[in-house]
Amino acid sequence: MLKQLMPYVTLLSLLVITTNCKQSTNGNHQDGLDEVKQPYALVIHGGAGTIRRGEVSEEKEAKYTDMLATVLKNGESILKNGGSSEEAVVAVIAMMEDSPLFNAGRGAVFTHDGYNSLDASIMNGDDLNAGSVAGVSKIKNPIKAALAVKDKSDHVLLSGAGADEFSIRLSLEVVDSAYFFTQDRWDRLQHILSEEKETGSINIVNPDDKYGTVGAVALDRNGNITAGTSTGGMTNKRYDRIGDSPIIGAGTYADNRTCGVSCTGHGEFFIRYHVASDVTKRMQYLGESVEIAASTIIENLEEVGGAGGLIALDKNGRVAMPFNTSGMYRGYVNADTLVTAIFGEE
Ligand code: ASP
């Protein structure tokens, strides 16, 4: 009897697995695109965190939505016209670094000591070449410094004053520290410092914080994937703390055989769980789709208390944008469509 029922039981379990998988990625599946290989694609994020509808004014929502769309259109025109995924990633991340809306470049958060300390990384999926900078404070566009480390040094990661010096020698644009000042970020630091005084506890992690890092992954017409990430890190960080964003394998990873990934969230967890490379390795070793690999990792991270999200783009242009926070600024574009979203239910 059981033997006769087995085919039905198997079919039923398959249906359940498929349904569960479909529910697990914040509704970001692109159903119907299974067989489509996009000629090019670009996915971006502007950080995950406590971003709830109702707590964000309509004006602010419109500002972010417009900015995400402008960035995507800009990146798309590079890819559409035959530009490389690396060109697109550097251009769109530099645009977000130049905007005070995001915690990267100009809008970077403040350290405990009241300055801005910036991290960035970039990786190519064709040769697995990569470059990063951590704790730079003079370079206008840290993503360009990361690119220079990749292309013009024998190293992968440079940090602090040395990374600034290296970038200055290569004539990257330098700015005064006042360039990075934004009132919102300064007020946020003052608020946390006064809380610290009251409670006597030292903590860089505040559940109300929006992480706000930026990232991009692009697939170009030659099938090359590039991923990049740029951040000011976490408000009130001290002791030259470095998060996941400049760590290849944690905050950024790209491999043409599978996908490219850029992360945002509580960096210590992303370093410990090696999140970005784990997405690519799950695809490679377990044969998972980009959506399943990415959403499984973000769900597992939530179980251990790691808040955040990621964007991933596979070699066919399929996108995953899972997160376990209430929102994540995000969007993607390909030859068929342009999508932006902020809140969890979208
Ligand atoms: N992941 C970054 C860090 O830990 C923060 C962020 O994503 O906003 O430095």
Image: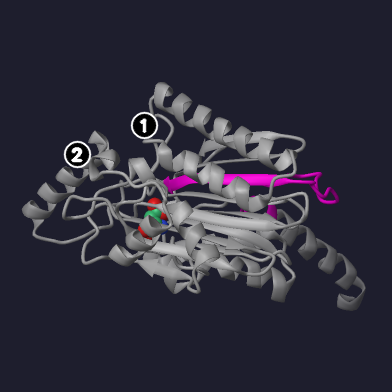
- Left or right: 215, with 87 as reference point: left
Q: Is mark 1 on a helix, strand or loop?
A: loop
Residue nearest the observer in this picture, 115 or 154: 154
Marks 2 and 1, the one that precedes in the sequence:
1
Q: Is residue 101 above or below residue 145?
A: above
* Amino acid, disc 2: Asp
Badge number at residue 134:
none
Q: Position of residue 314 (x, y in %)?
A: 70, 57
Q: Which marked residue is nearer to the observer: mark 2 or mark 1?
A: 2
On the image, numbered disc 1 is attached to which residue?
A: 55
Badge number at residue 187:
2
Q: Per the image, is 289 magenta? A: no
Residue shown at 76%/56% (left/top)?
A: 223
Whether residue 335 is visible here, answered yes or no, is yes
**Residues shaded magenta:** 21-48
Residue shown at 23%/40% (left/top)?
A: 178
- Left or right: 42, with 184 as reference point: right
Q: Where is residue 40 in the image (x, y as percent from the top left)?
A: 74, 46
Q: In this view, does 190 lie above or below 196?
A: above
Q: Per the image, is 46 magenta? A: yes
Q: Where is residue 239 in the image (x, y as percent from the top left)?
A: 21, 67
Q: In which quarter of the image is the C terminus?
A: top right
Residue nearest the observer in this picture, 221 or 166: 166
